[in-house]
Amino acid sequence: MSSSLVNSLCFLVHFYLNLTPTFPPSALISFSFNRKDPECYPPDDPCSESPCQNSGICVRAEGTTRGFVCQCPLFWWGDFCEKHISPCSLAEQMETRAREYSASTRNRSVCLNGGVCIDHPTKFDYFCKCPEGWTGDRCEQPVGHVSSGCAECEIVCNLLLF
């Protein structure tokens, strides 16, 4: 599309939407519906080519190296919102911080006893793949161990021991 056609389009959109057109119109060469309101960009605008990924929003920021910053959606980060936050790594960071504030020595991994943390494939969650002989949400219980949280189980176990 020619720049004069784009400039005319930008001017008309601004006019019909009662927006203040940007002048001079000859400086406008691109048009975007990325935001709530249509916006015409000057030729050197760093946001004109939508550099932010994964639905990140480009915000012009003078004084920065690139001239813009990306506002990333939830669970994405990086200069261009290109990095996904892993639930496992986030949980491990929280575990590490909790250990720093606690006198107890806790494992850095959220999964215990050699368990492996695996990011859930469809939602922002994780689960632990436990090694043989271990079970529980965090691989914290030996297989065959009766939890003391169940009163009925304790009664049955006590009866079996007699």
Image: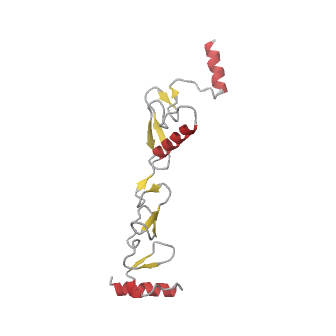
Report the number of numbered marks.
Answer: 0
Quarter of the picture holding the N terminus: bottom left
Q: Quadrant of residue 3?
A: bottom left
Give me the residue at 44% from left, 41% from top: 118
Q: Between residue 71 and residue 14, name the one nearer to us.
A: 71
Residue found farthest to the front: 63
Figure check: 112 above or below 92? above
Inspect this view and state whether residue 56 appears: no
Q: Position of residue 114 (x, y in %)?
A: 44, 31
Q: Is residue 44 left or right of residue 89?
A: left
Give me the residue at 44% from left, 87% from top: 23
Give me the residue at 36% from left, 86% from top: 5
Quarter of the picture holding the C terminus: top right
Give me the residue at 48% from left, 40% from top: 127
Q: Is residue 98 left or right of residue 156?
A: left
Q: Between residue 3 and residue 141, name the one nearer to us.
A: 3
Q: Position of residue 124 (x, y in %)?
A: 49, 49
Q: Quadrant of residue 161?
A: top right
Residue found farthest to the top: 162
Figure check: 57 above or below 92? below
